[in-house]
Amino acid sequence: MRRAPERAAGGAGTEVTVRTSHLIHPAEAEFDEVGETKLDHLVAELLTALGEDVTREGMQRTPQRVERSLRFLMSGYDVSARDVINGALFTAESSDMVVVKGIEFYSLCEHHMLPFFGKAHIAYIPGKTVLGLSKFARVVDVFARRMQIQERMTAQIADALAEVLEPEGLAVVTEASHLCMMMRGVEKQGSTTRTAAMRGVFKTDARTRQEFIESIL
Ligand code: ZN
């Protein structure tokens, strides 16, 4: 294993804010314009049954775009956390807490197929291994790009990272706005839902947990 180039050496816990805009691959910018479609007739049928005229200008390529968009938004089924981590594991040089905060995510609620989106914050106390910092956002995407509920997504991110990193402890907190609530007026505008998954020392040691929570406030 190589040494982590992105990780500050020694001192107090490392804290970084990952900007995720660069994580969108250029090819993904055209995700709704290219690629095979075979479900577009079903989308057209659905829209027609809902009273829409899919032959009018502006809607003519909508069924194909919707299919490609959905394929992208649900592409997490095709990959595992190990796939995206792809060997970016390095020997830990200290056991200080690492906090990666503000990872943007966009997911779909499995009850209404409407987006929920927000930020994920991840912390861990390394065991023998650390992970390249950019990989945390990739792992979040693996589980966000599925039909989800926020609680399960949070737990899956924690369990996948814990399995690969074998840390002393690992914690994931996600904060999200749910369009299925906001658009239907069920939830007050601007309110967010927070879920947490604590593993290892983050579960057993209140001070470690508190240090993490304070760092993401
Ligand atoms: Zn919903």
Image (cartoon, rainbow, N blue to C red):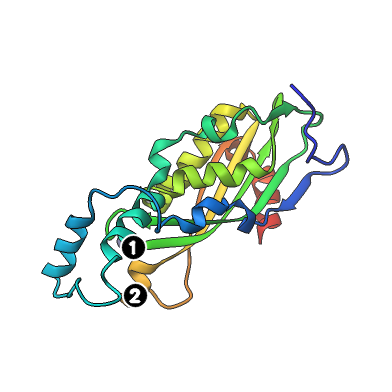
- Crowd tier of the residue under label 2, counting other residues whose Cα lies within 10 Å: few below 14, some 14–19, many 20 or above: few
Q: Which residue is depicted at the point 48% across and 67% down?
A: 192
Figure check: 74 above or below 184: above
Q: How many marks?
A: 2
Per the model, the C-alpha gap separating discs 2 and 1 is 9 Å
Pointer 1 residue = 114
Q: Are marks 2 and 1 in contact (CB under 8 Å)?
A: yes
Farthest residue toward the left? 49
Q: Which residue is depicted at the point 47% across and 33% down?
A: 80
Task: Of the two numbered discs 2 and 1 on the same chain, state the one appearing first in sequence.
Answer: 1
In front: 2, or 172?
2
Q: Could you tell me the amino acid type at mark 2?
A: Met
Q: In the shown orientation, is residue 184 left or right of residue 54? A: right
Q: Quarter for ligand 1?
A: bottom left
Image quadrant in which the C terminus is located:
bottom right
Q: In the shown orientation, is residue 29 left or right of residue 62? A: right
- The image shows residue 158 at horizontal and vertical percentages of 53, 39
Secondary element at image label 1: loop
Q: In the shown orientation, is residue 58 left or right of residue 10? A: left
Q: Within 8 Å: ligand 1 and the Cβ of disc 1?
A: yes
Pointer 2 residue = 183
- The image shows residue 161 at horizontal and vertical percentages of 56, 35
User: Residue 108 occupies which quadrant of the picture?
Assistant: bottom left
Q: Could you tell me the amino acid type at mark 1?
A: Leu
Q: Which residue is depicted at the point 35% across and 49% down?
A: 71
Secondary element at image label 2: loop
- The image shows residue 78 at horizontal and vertical percentages of 40, 37
Q: Is residue 197 visible?
A: no
Figure check: 70 above or below 13: below
Image quadrant in which the N terminus is located:
top right
